[in-house]
Amino acid sequence: MKQVLIAALSIAMLMAAFTASAASESDYEASFAKASALAAKALAMDAGWTVTGKALLDARQAAADQHFDQATALAQQAQALAQASIRQSEEQQTAWHAAVVK
């Protein structure tokens, strides 16, 4: 799980680093919508992480304060976290078979 979280955070930081131009409100809204959809999918799978919800709340607050660069980066971080939680859930659906003593 640590490896998945580290990978997700690394991806989020790289995504934020490559968005060097100033993010607009529409960039934030697109990122937030995608992150929200992935977070909802993770929750529906009972795989949602609390840090994903916190990142979404922080992104919403940054956008409310008109800090769209920060809001977009936080939404992208939430997106990466939601994707990682979904991947972890999918992995664990089959990985438990290897742990069963035969």
Image: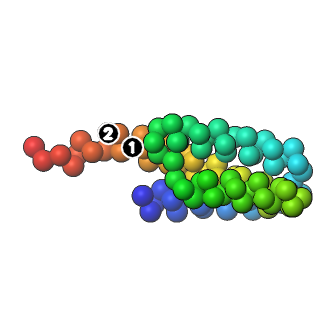
Q: Which residue does the image show at 59% across and 44% down from the upper left?
A: 39
Mark identifier at residue 43: none
Left or right: 58 in relation to 47: right
Q: In this view, does 96 lie above or below 70?
A: above
- SS assignment at label 2: helix
Q: Taking 41 as reference, is 76 left or right?
A: right
Q: Are marks 2 and 1 in contact (CB under 8 Å)?
A: yes
Q: Indicate which disc residue 91 carries.
A: 1
Instruction: Give above or below for 25 relative to 3.
Output: above
Residue type at numbered disc 1: Glu
Please give the name of the residue rendered at 85% of the width and 56% of the height, measured from the top-left corner. 64
Among the 4 quarters of the image, the one containing residue 12: bottom right
For label 2, the residue is 94
> Residue 3 appears at what percent x and percent y?
45, 60
Q: What is the basis of the colouring in this image? A: rainbow
Please, what secondary structure does the residue beneath circle 1 have? helix
